[in-house]
Image (cartoon, rainbow, N blue to C red):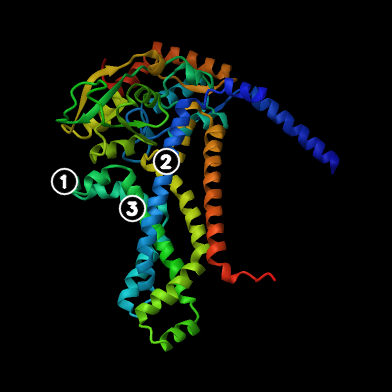
């Protein structure tokens, strides 16, 4: 009995050892859905979006299979560390705070943030005075949450949501005066899906880098340097051979 | 003490800023739970009397109400009251909107209706358990049904209901943790915010849990004291 235990423990130790240095042939991505057009379900319930298609193309390039696992945003990094999946590809902004916990790939896209309000809103520009006592919606735990909290937390009421959907619902019901979203997400969910009902207020926000970082990256566990390197190489290849541009144009048009 | 200072020195989570978040969360939780329990209690007394009525047209509607609110999860009730109300056309123009607009009042309404349903059933049980002898004695003294209710049934029913009600208060405190799903920054909301910002689930939630524990202890001691005073006649006489 004791021997059996020793042997099985030994087996476990070896298995764990190989798991640490293993070469992935199957990569599981954590993703927070919906965040149209980056990641969402289409009319048939199929998972799609810019991140999903690019991720699948990257996996094909590397020669691994991939799987998408849905996870709410505020638990997405802990889920990676807990090995629920091997990488995060979910519109995640690269910044120093996150770099302490995860390893980022090269940025694969840069998208500014923007303020959205109902059409005809009295708010015309974004400053502390205009936002005084206004209700602002943000997604909890995002860099946008930190940006709005640090800059306007003293004057405005900030409501934090688990999903972008709940936030849009509350903007529609007039509970919120403004939401702060990635421009491209707001463009699809608010400007296109509800034509004429919403407008962008003020300028697009891309600064300071402390919050808006260098763009979106794929996040890996710190020790998975080899895997991140493989994705970086694949990303470079896809950018060269035109696959990247093709996917980009499908979601954001020519630019 | 040195290790304690060292711990504080390289702790990047519990800054004055996040402590302020927790404090606001504590205030919100306390307000929410206290107000909903208070209003729930006031509602529950007449409802419990109605629920024990012999007339079915009084007791049946109250039974349906308590059945629905005890038979569905509080989280669902909260979602319906918070997200559901906005689908009534024109709700934004009514006098109710300034209240429903905030996350606080929908949460308060949901919690109040929920705790009122449970408290009604607790009181009804206590009222039903009044011994026949006491009621017959009251009648023999010529007391009217109203006077019997006020002087005989209710005082003893409240005493009997006290331990069960103490549990309901603690359940309510713990149930209030779901308020953060409708953006309310209660104690759990503060913990979720800190968790999401620093990716530190243990620190963020353990701190919140410790505060909940303190609150629960305070409630426990209050009810123990109350029971000692009000149920003194039921304790074995030492002597």
| Residue under label 2 | B27
Q: Quadrant of residue A139?
A: top left
| Residue under label 3 | B109
Instruction: Tell me whether marks 2 and 3 sit on the same chain.
Output: yes
Q: CA distance from mark 2 to mark 3?
A: 18 Å
Relative placement, left or right, of A160 versus A64 is left
| Quadrant holding the N terminus of chain B | top right
Q: Quadrant of residue A159?
A: top left
A181 vs B223: above or below:
above
Label 3 resides on the chain identified as B
Q: CA distance from mark 2 to mark 1?
A: 30 Å
User: Horizontal and vertical percent for residue A99?
Assistant: 51, 18
Q: Within 10 angstroms of label 3, few (less than 14), some, or many (20 or more) residues? A: many
Label 1 resides on the chain identified as B
- Callout 1 secondary element: helix
Verify CB contact (< 8 Å) between mark 2 and mark 1: no
- Callout 3 secondary element: helix
| Quadrant holding the C terminus of chain B | bottom right
| Residue under label 1 | B93
Residue found 39% across the figure and 57% down from its top: B114
Answer whether residue A84 is visible to the viewer in this image.
Answer: no
From the image, state whether disc 2 or disc 3 is nearer to you.
2
User: Horizontal and vertical percent for residue B26?
Assistant: 45, 40
Q: Nearer the viewer, residue A75 or A111?
A: A75
Q: How many marks?
A: 3
From the image, state whether disc 2 or disc 1 is nearer to you.
2
Residue found 45% across the figure and 74% down from its top: B127
Q: Quadrant of residue B60?
A: bottom left
User: Horizontal and vertical percent for residue B180?
Assistant: 41, 41
Tag 3 or tag 2, which sits nearer the N-term? Answer: 2
Verify CB contact (< 8 Å) between mark 2 and mark 3: no
User: Horizontal and vertical percent for residue A172?
Assistant: 23, 38
């Amino acid at each position: 009995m004791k021997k059996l235990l020793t042997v099985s423990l030994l087996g476990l130790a070896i298995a764990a050892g190989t798991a640490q240095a293993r070469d992935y042939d199957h990569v599981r991505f954590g993703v927070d859905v919906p965040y149209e057009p980056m990641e969402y379900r289409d009319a048939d319930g199929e998972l799609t979006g810019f991140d999903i298609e690019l991720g699948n193309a990257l996996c094909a390039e590397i020669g691994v299979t991939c799987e998408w696992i849905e996870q709410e945003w505020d638990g997405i990094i802990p889920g990676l560390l807990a090995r629920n999946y091997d990488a995060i590809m979910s519109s995640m902004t690269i910044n120093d705070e996150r770099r302490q916990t995860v390893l980022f790939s090269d940025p694969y896209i840069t998208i500014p943030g923007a303020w959205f309000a109902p059409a005809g809103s009295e708010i015309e520009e974004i400053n502390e005075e205009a936002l005084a006592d206004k209700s602002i919606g943000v997604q909890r735990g995002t860099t946008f949450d930190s940006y709005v909290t640090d800059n306007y937390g003293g004057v405005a009421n900030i409501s934090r949501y688990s999903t972008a959907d709940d936030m849009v619902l509350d903007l529609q019901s007039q509970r919120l005066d403004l939401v702060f979203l990635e421009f491209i997400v707001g463009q699809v969910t608010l400007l296109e899906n509800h034509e004429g009902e919403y407008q962008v207020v003020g300028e697009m926000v891309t600064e300071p880098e402390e919050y808006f970082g260098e763009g979106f990256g794929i996040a890996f566990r710190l020790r998975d340097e080899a895997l991140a390197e493989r994705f970086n190489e694949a990303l470079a290849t896809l950018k060269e051979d035109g696959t990247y541009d093709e996917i980009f144009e499908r979601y954001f048009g020519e630019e | 003490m040195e290790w304690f200072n060292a711990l504080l020195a390289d702790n990047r989570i519990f800054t004055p800023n996040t402590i302020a978040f927790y404090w606001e969360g504590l205030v919100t939780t306390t307000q929410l739970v206290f107000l909903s329990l208070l209003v729930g209690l006031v509602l529950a007394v007449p409802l419990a009397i109605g629920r024990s009525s012999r007339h079915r047209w009084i007791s049946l509607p109250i039974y349906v109400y308590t059945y629905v609110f005890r038979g569905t999860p509080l989280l669902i009730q909260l979602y319906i009251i918070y997200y559901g109300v906005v689908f009534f056309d024109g709700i934004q123009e009514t006098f109710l909107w300034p209240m429903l607009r905030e996350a606080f009042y929908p949460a308060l309404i949901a919690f109040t209706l929920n705790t009122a349903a449970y408290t009604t059933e607790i009181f009804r049980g206590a009222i039903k358990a009044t011994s026949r002898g006491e009621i017959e004695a009251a009648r023999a003294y010529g007391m009217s049904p109203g006077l019997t209710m006020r002087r005989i049934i209710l005082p003893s029913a409240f005493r009997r209901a006290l331990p069960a009600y103490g549990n309901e208060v603690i359940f309510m405190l713990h149930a209030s943790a779901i308020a953060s799903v409708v953006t309310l920054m209660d104690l759990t909301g503060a913990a979720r915010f800190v968790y999401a910002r620093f990716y530190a689930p243990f620190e963020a939630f353990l701190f919140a849990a410790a505060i909940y524990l303190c609150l629960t202890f305070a409630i426990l001691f209050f009810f123990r004291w109350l029971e000692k005073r009000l149920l003194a006649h039921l304790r074995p006489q030492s002597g």
